[in-house]
Amino acid sequence: MAFSLRTTALAVMLLVGAAAGSPSYGAEPASVAHQPQIDDIVAAISARQIEAYVKKLVSFQTRHT
């Protein structure tokens, strides 16, 4: 089975990306300080607001909704 140059390049990029994105073996993960701002942002999200936003987008009646 012959592989095209494009397929081979894609496979190499995926392998390199997976290797670069994986943590080092045995390394301790870096601890991240608690950020209260993130809690505030998450707390501000509500199902009602999301529903209103989606309904507004649907009201434009484009094919991408």
Image (spheres, helix red, strand yellow):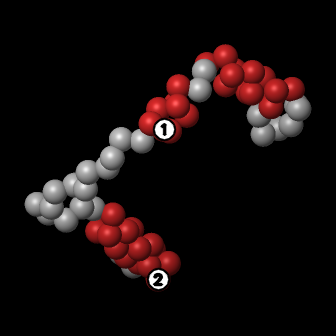
Disc number placed over residue 30 in the picture, else none: none
Q: Earlier in the sequence, mark 1 or mark 2?
A: 2
Density class for disc 2 (Cα within 10 Å; few <14, some 14-19, many ≥20) is few
Residue 17 visible in the picture: yes
Quarter of the image for residue 7 reads: bottom left
Measured from the top left, where is residue 24 in percent x and y?
A: 19, 65
| Residue tagged 2 | 5
Density class for disc 1 (Cα within 10 Å; few <14, some 14-19, many ≥20) is few
Disc number placed over residue 38 in the picture, else none: 1
Q: How many marks?
A: 2
The residue closer to the viewer here, 20 or 40, is: 40
**Dots 1, 2 in contact, CB < 8 A:** no
Looking at the image, is mark 1 or mark 2 nearer the viewer?
1
Measured from the top left, where is residue 27 in percent x and y?
A: 15, 61
Element under disc 1: helix
Left or right for 51, reference 31:
right
- The residue at 24%/61% (across/down) is 23
